[in-house]
Amino acid sequence: MLGLNYASLDTDNKPAATPPIDVTALISDPAERVRLKGLLEETLYGSWPEGLPVSFSDWRIIVPDYLEGRGTLEEMDITIGADAGARTFQLVAAFPNGAVQAPVVIAQTFGSNCATFPEQPVTSLDGDPCTIRDFGKFAGMIISAVFGEYIAEAPVDLYFDAGFAYASFHASDFIPDDKDEAGPALEGLGGDPNPGSVLMAWAYAFSAAVTALEADERLDNERMAILGHSRHGKAALLAAAWDPRIDAVISHQSGFGGAALSRSPSGERLDRMVKSYPHWLAPSAAAYAADPARLPFDQHHLLALIAPRPLFLGNARRDVWSDPNSSYRAAIAASKVWKAYGETGLKDDITHFDPAADIAYFLRPGGHSIVDDDIEAFLAFLSAHLGTKPELPNRMRAP
């Protein structure tokens, strides 16, 4: 839990992901995709809120000469839901000067928008422009020291360098990451159905951001990537499984409920998650927490629903809580689906990172954080897959 142990690099002495994926059915029969999504909804995640209303405002230019004139910093309101229970949050985006059909990275953040864009006049939680830096100077230093420089602040300049626009929002501004507040917020949205869990709601917020951004001619709606760390990495996987408009996924240290196998005895485990964060999952998840072997699927099936689109799975040796070893075994099992589509699968080496692979596994030293090495790997993956306009027929969206 404290990052004092190391994840095992030995995957041969551990069971392969079960049950096996019916690869032929998944890539040839749309009913199999529907069936798998239904299992995910019925057991762990609850309903995907198909048709829940999404609306958004016009862009507000808040910094016209952002990053010393390299681009603009803009903000819009996104509203999800109907009637009095609809909830609004701010999407903040940085557009490079002269952007036309540019690729974009859409991130969910742990910190507020004030933390992601320090000292910029984005809208704070109280509705006024931000006037303080992230969490406060002292708290910010502690958080950055423990969880990495980029756990809150976004390296927008590096995304610009790679030719990408950047957009992000604070997921908890939509649905609070709080077991007491989350339930009433979900119930009030007015959909039929509403999101079945907070993770599914955050996933739908990713989809809402795609809806808002694909209308902007400065961006290429066929080169839209999403990025999430930890709990938001779980949401990113769900968003991509349900929304085929998402063209690439970075799921960093997503752990249980994300890429880590539910049947694994290591790390956080489902029983601990259900106890500590019951709002993340659907109430039905409690029935499987004590015996995950009863689940009719495991997380390699969730990964497989994203194929053949590019998927990045980030991990760290000391992040034993997120179980990098079982995430790798899930990725190995799922890579058969990418290969069946004619894409590049994983190599049989947990330490090998190939950013050009369509399912890319990254393992670095250190713990549960976002550091320079992670950003470098993110950018290598994004540049390999979305850095130039894809023209080949195998760069297709999943059905």
Image (spheres, grey):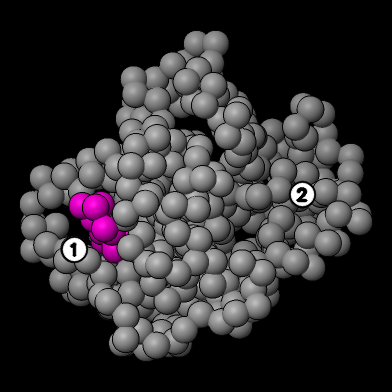
Task: Residue under label 1, please give it.
Answer: 19
Residue at mark 2: 115
Q: Residue 146, how many percent across, how many down?
A: 75, 66
Name the amino acid type tagged 1: Pro
**Is residue 300 a member of the stretch shown in magenta?**
yes
Quadrant position of the N terminus in the picture: bottom right
Say what secondary structure mark 1 lies in. loop
Drawn side of residue 213 relative to residue 285, left or right: right
Name the amino acid, label 2: Ala
Q: What stretch is highlighted in magenta?
A: 293-304
| Residue 263 drawn above or below residue 270 | below
In the displayed structure, 217 sits above or below 331; it is above
Residue 58 picture location, percent across and down:
60, 29
Nearest the eye: 38 or 358: 38
User: For the image shown, how many numbered marks are present on the structure?
Assistant: 2
Of residue 27 and residue 295, the one placed in the foreground of this image is 295
